[in-house]
Image: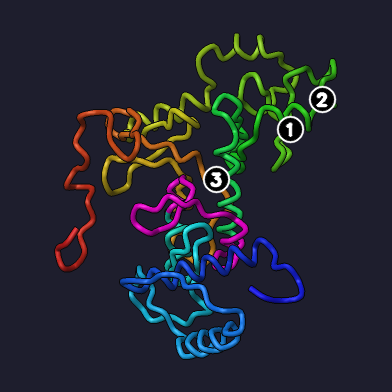
Amino acid sequence: MLGTWRPTKSKIEDMVNEALSLMSKFKQCEFSLIPRGQVGYATKLATELVGTKKRETCAICLEDTDLSKIYAVEGCAHRFCFSCMKEHVKIKLLGGTLPACPQDGCTTKLTVKDSKIFLSPQLLEIMVQRIREGQIPPTQKIYCPYSKCSALMSLREVISSWALMYTVAGGPTLRKCIKCKGLFCISCKVPWHAGMSCSDYKRKYPHVRPEDAKLQNLAQQRSWRKCVKCNHMIELAEGCYHITCVLKTCFLLTFAASVPASCRCGYEFCYTCGKEWKDKKATCSCRLWDERNIIHDRGGRR
């Protein structure tokens, strides 16, 4: 590499990734050192070669795609078209997991910074949320109790952002959601019970609030299940009994133009017994599906 200025680290990394990508396309390839006087000639040949190749075959969809629409994963240099990358990341995010390189066996994690080139603002916001969820310890996670919000917060930020509410009038348990600004009780995990202390509230509702009791009765009648991680009710409309907890709107809008900006916890469990799925495997012996819940296409396939 010659020039007046020393190349930046990122520039060197980009060039190394390009070189590794090119090497992977040959059955046999090795580096060779050339005399300084021949660098210009070698550069000329390389430039002409790159100029003749303006399209590349995506390893996922096998479509010939313009090089400007091909994405090289930072860190491993695996290359895929923007369309396939966007769909891969979207499916992973709506499933409650952080996306990695789609290459089989590759574990390179994708970053928000590098994914901006092919993701929509809505999906980028979900990706930021997923990363945030992974950074908050389970014991520190707090969800807004208002059903129209359900924002995820950490115990530390709730306390620090609402320190002014430590007053006699409000009591030490009054907090405000950092997203919707709704007031709630951090001890009871419910919307703020104005004019009632936590002990009074718990005496009045020792087991469950009347509105929650109605929901539980309805859930029992319709065989709904509650996610043990975030306590939200889930209804199985169709498909197998392997459940990933996300907001219903996420599934409804998976193929729509807009995607909701936030999703639920991503906890995986068996819809029949409630036991957790670990590493994509069941920890129970329940059957995976009921034929009545499987959708068949017009050709009779599942």
- 94 or 36: nearer the eye? 36
Q: Secondary structure at mark 3?
A: helix
- 111 or 75: nearer the eye? 75
Q: Which quadrant holds residue 21?
A: bottom left
Are circles 2 and 1 on residues that touch, CB within 8 Å?
yes
- Image mark count: 3
Quadrant the C terminus occupies: bottom left
List x then y, in percent, for residue 277: 33, 34
Answer whether residue 100 is magenta in the image.
yes
**16 displayed left or right of 240:** right
Is 79 above or below relative to 57? above
| Residue that label 2 marks | 165
Q: Which region is colored magenta?
A: 92-121
**38 displayed left or right of 289:** right
List x then y, in percent, for residue 276: 35, 30
Quadrant the N terminus occupies: bottom right
Outermost residue on the left side: it is: 300
* Label 3 vs 2, first from the N-terminus: 3
* Label 1 vs 3, first from the N-terminus: 3
| Residue that label 3 marks | 130
